Image: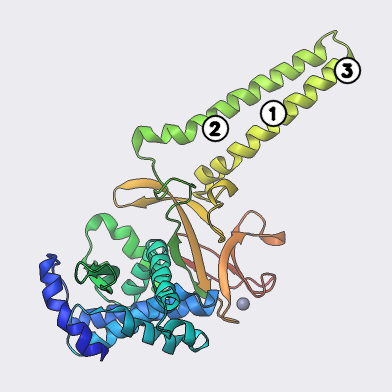
Amino acid sequence: MLAGGARKYTAAKRSECGTDMEVTDSELFLRAALVIDQAAQGLVDSRGREDWMTLLQALAQLSAAQAQDGDPAPLFAPEPLREKCAELDPRDKLYWLTEEDSSRKKFSKAWDALKEVVPRLEANFLQRSQKARVAARLELFDIQKDLDKRAKLYGFRAIPIELPEDIGPQQREVVIAEERRNSSNADIEYLEEMEVYPIPGVRRALRINLEGWRSIFMLTPLLLALVGGGFAIWLLIQFWMSQLPMRTIFQWTVLIAMVGGMVTWWVWPLYRLIDQKIVMAPAILQMTSRFYHVLVIRREGEKKVVRMLRFAATCPLCGGEVEVQEGRRTLRGRYVGACGRNPVEHVFSFDHVLRTGLRVVQ
Ligand SMILES: [Zn+2]
């Protein structure tokens, strides 16, 4: 029922809205859909099932099946999708399938959540596609069937991507890193996600350009702090050399120490970021998310930028989710991947450039 229903709309609708169908064939679409299916399964395994994951997986599996039948751009009505969701998520079967509004609401909520989450998984999908040598990644796509708002169709749109061999000379470094990674005997490989809107109320991803003169934005606070520190020390010496009563000297000392401590607390992460190219994201940027994020300085094409990212992997020992955090005890000063199930024993080193790690036995 779903195959017939869905296929009818596809060609007509795509041409109506001017979508370029030539970018992909059904074979490529099939392989790209399988990548998404795998990614969705990974998310379910590591984070526990949520409705948007179920919907993502349903969409991927249905798209894969359609593509296998030769449809290069499948789209689906909500009904077959909800059926597939019920099949993937038997515990919630009843809620996916009732004919009442609640079920439609569950579906549209899941779709909205999916649209919100997917941009931050893009890097993850891209890396998976590149690893599987699939020259396309899929993006969510929906379209109104008629004027009726309820009659929407859902699916993916294929975006061609460049696989490492096809890319230009300026990205050769990335290829080298990629090759080294593939040939290394890493215990664990990290996938990257991006926090899309880290600043509450600002719907923009964090991307600070550091090219050329713009780097003064990063250096100015440090220089100011340094000058301020020098001034504070000079001031302290003046107080202690003066004839003022001891109580006054003591009060000023405490005040200067407190202000100095606060400034250091603000500036220290910035210093570490510049010095080590990576730092845990300050709490203020992590407020909108329950995951650990890092700030990294890296090259993107020709530009040097600061990015807020989350690196995660699946624990090879127990299948739990490994997240990057600050190292403790003997690993102090480093960043490590710690497993959510056993953050003390399942610990891996973390290299944000190669995105790999080795198990650390302490
Ligand atoms: Zn583990």
Number of the front mark, 2 or 1: 1
> Residue beneath label 2, please?
222
Q: Quadrant of residue 113?
A: bottom left
Would you place residue 66 above or below residue 290 in this image?
below
Nearer the observer, 327 or 129: 129
> Residue beneath label 1, please?
259
Residue 212 pos. (x, y %): 34, 35
Which class describes the residues within 10 Å of circle 3: few (<14), some (14-19), or many (20+)?
few
Residue 250 pos. (x, y %): 84, 21
Number of the front mark, 2 or 3: 3
Q: CA distance from mark 2 to mark 1?
A: 15 Å
Sequence-wise first label, 2 or 1:
2
> Residue beneath label 3, please?
247
Residue 278 falls left or right of residue 338: left
Would you place residue 345 above or below residue 297 in this image?
below
Identity, as a three-letter code, of the amino acid under mark 3: Arg
Colour scheme of the picture: rainbow
Element under disc 1: helix
Residue 49 falls left or right of residue 180: right
Quick one: which residue is furthest to the top in this view?
243
The quarter of the picture where the N terminus appears is bottom left
Q: Quadrant of residue 102?
A: bottom left
Q: Quadrant of residue 163?
A: bottom left
Q: CA distance from mark 3 to mark 1?
A: 19 Å
